[in-house]
Amino acid sequence: MKMYKVFALVYLDFKIFANAKGRLAEFLYFPITTVILWGLFSDFVKDMALQAGLVVFVVNIFWTFAYLAQSTVNMQVNEDSWSGSMKQIMITGLSEFEYLFARIISSTIVSLLVIAVMLGLAYYGFGLTLLAQNFYAIIMLSLITLVGSIGLAILVASIIFMAGIEYAFLGWTSSQIFLLLSAPFYPATIYPPVIQPLVWVMPFTAVFENVRFIVANGAIDSTLLGISIITAAAYVIFSLPIYYYVFKYAKKTGRIVRMS
Amino acid sequence: MLNIFYNVIMKTIEVNAMNVIEVSGVSKKFKEQGRKFYALRDVSFDVRDGEIFGLLGPNGSGKTTMLNIIMNILDPDTGHVKILGKDPRKDRIVMESLNFVSGDARFHWALTVGNVLNFYGMIYNIEKAERKKRLNELTKAFGIEHLLNRRFYTLSTGETMRAVLVKALLNKPKIILMDEPTLGLDPEIAIKVRKEIRKANKKYNTTVLLTSHYMSEVEELADRIAFIYKGSIVDTGSISDVKSKKFDTYEVIITLTEAKDRRFLLKNGFRIKGNKISKSVSNDKNISEILSLLESRGLRINYVETRKPTLEDYFVKMLNEAEE
């Protein structure tokens, strides 16, 4: 992997982020309003259902982070296509993995900054003390969420390269179906038994279960932590060869050219 | 001793005539509405070091598909492309010796000209100080140094093309692929672009592979051409060679003071239009014979012009023949 090519693309991404106000809004406006919205809600319900309020608050923070980490990778692929610059980028001798890795780095930097802002606001603005009490657990869950989101982003990028730019919308919509199946605010046992195995292979189910466990017990569940690490890693490990073969297929069938 | 001398000479000839692009037996099929069709069929040609090579053909003939395969963003079904002797699919770094200019080049709307040029400097691994130096030189040479902070999409067509040419020369490429480089440009800017193409070709010995709809442009710039029709190369060679293969005559147009003696003129194969007479003359025949013939009949000549077949005539003829 030629790192100068990766860094060049990261440079390009950050110039786009800095110059495109819409992207800045995406990175700041939605995360901050999410924290305020659910922070106020959790404050309101604290006398009625303290734990439920906290679960909704913390899961929303994690969900926003997961969505951002995944969609930032996919949106940069979409932007290359929409702006008609993919061809100009690809002909520089860039490999499929340098292209992907650059987008993962850009997304990781942005997402980590955003979750730091969100957690800081939740702690200082809404007194979310469990963050400080479980500091390392929260950091660990954030990193696992990031890895799972990246795995998901690689899968979505593969679908877009396979099916064409008409499926670019998956970049910002696909995470919703994963949210639906990731048992965000309730345990996996709520789902019908036939769906439950599927729920457990979602990248974020164990993370959300653990968030609820922390809220209820003030400590992290190590079994759930192990499951979440394995699931997130599995998403990355399995998505990479899929991406590799799909990219080859897209190059063979002319999808890359049509996306340019 | 003689053998060593021979080997040295042969090696020199080999290096001088090195093919920087080798396209060999390339075929590409696409599927459209359930039907497969050949976009390229067994295409082979070479582009030699330092030459300007024109790839001609009507719309949909496979020119852009060929360029996409050379640029390694599309894989051929069969055959291969070699850039500087290397297969870009296996040795992708060879693509850093190549650059691309397109008449419809676009970049992200949020990027300034400076952002785009810096990005290309970085992705071609040009060290920061050197990048700055080259950007200074090239932006000055192309008169765009004042545009570096402007968003790319706000540039006029001419400014965009100049910025794209700066981008294309930034990595001092051995090869530049040009897809319709003067498309939609004002004649004045098109002339400038052609001048820059020639300059890059001569000054840096940059090989150029050019596609253009403007035959006069290809005729002005190219050393050799290949004519591609329905995915196959139907002719290739130097411009004078391909033209002489198709046209063995040229036209002589003579303006007389008075077009008298019509019978004599018609008998000798002249066409008459007012005071102007014209005749197709074999390439190997001297014009002075015709002039002597006319003078011997007392016809007074005012003006003589010759019209040799242009590349456009060649293009039309090739197209008609192919369609027949």
Image (cartoon, helix red, strand yellow):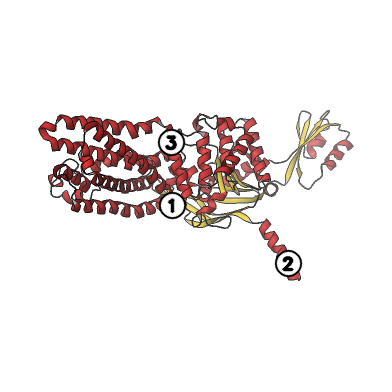
Q: Label 3: which residue?
A: A16
- Callout 1, which amino acid? Lys
Q: Residue at x 21, y 34 (%)?
A: A127
Callout 3: chain: A
On screen, B24 above or below B180? below
x and y percent of residue B21 in the render? 59, 53
Q: Residue furthest front?
A: A133
The label on residue B6 is 2
Q: Residue at x 64, y 30 (%)?
A: B188
Characterize the local packing of mark 2: few (<14), some (14-19) or many (20 or more) Cα atoms within 10 angstroms.
few
Give the CA separation, mark 3 to mark 1.
30 Å
x and y percent of residue B279 in the render? 76, 39
Q: Can residue B324 be seen?
A: no
The label on residue A252 is 1
Contact (CB < 8 A) between labels 3 and 2? Answer: no
Callout 2: chain: B
Which mark lies nearer to you, 3 or 1?
A: 3
- Callout 3, which amino acid? Ile
In the rendered image, which quarter is residue B24 located in? Answer: bottom right
